[in-house]
Amino acid sequence: MISNKPYIIRAMYDWIVDNGWTPHLQVDANYPGVKVPQEHAQEGVIVLNMAPSAVVALSMDNTWFTFKARFGGVEATLGFPPEAVLAIFARENGQGMPFPPEPYPEELLKGEEEALEAPPTLSAVEGKKPKAVEGSTTPESGKKKSPSKSAKKKPTLTVVK
């Protein structure tokens, strides 16, 4: 069955634009295959202004979202699967819809990480122990690492001004 997530995101996007508000997407910047300016991501998440006046060549199909936008005056082409979207909301009032983080696809984690610019991490997946990805570093099994405050919090919507 086809996922309903891209349909819901497109419907929410249209609803936000039709009301004259500014649509924003919160995206898991660590999701495999995501192409976003990582220097603008905070704690593995990036919030993107999706206003029609802020993006060029917006395409939101069932398997891939892509568009061009400017970051610090430099144009960049962004792309990500709908599964990487954590929320869509209006900047002005925060109205929108959050989505639970999706598990990373196993086929990308096992054999295709060399095709990605950075190896994926499993930090955004709650309730699962991270699997070692070839070429990545993992903490020593004998040492316990205290989770940071951000690892304890669930994703929330915030108004971006």
Image (spheres, rainbow, N blue to C red):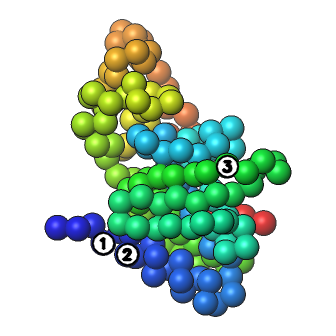
Between marks 2 and 1, how big is the CA–CA gap?
5 Å
Residue at the spot 60% in from the left edge and 66% down from the top edge: 57
Q: Position of residue 118 (x, y in %)?
A: 50, 29
Q: Hey, which quadrant is residue 32 in on the image?
A: top left
Residue that carries the numbered disc 2 in the rendered image:
7
Disc number placed over residue 4 in the picture, else none: 1
- Specify the amino acid type for callout 3: Ala
One can see residue 93 in this view:
yes
85 left or right, relative to 1: right
Q: Are marks 2 and 1 in contact (CB under 8 Å)?
A: yes
Mark 1 and mark 3 in contact (Cβ < 8 Å)? no
Q: Which residue is mark 3?
A: 76
Helix, strand or loop at label 3? It is strand
Answer with left or right where residue 108 lies relative to residue 121.
left
Rendering coords of residue 82 (x, y %): 41, 60
CB atoms at circles 2 and 3 under 8 Å apart?
no
Quadrant location of the N terminus in the rendered image: bottom left
Q: Residue 49 in the image: state x and y as whole percent.
A: 67, 64
Question: Does residue 70 appear to the left or right of 62 in the view shown?
Answer: right
Q: Residue at x 78, y 48 (%)?
A: 74
Residue at the image point whose x is 33% and y is 43% from the top: 104
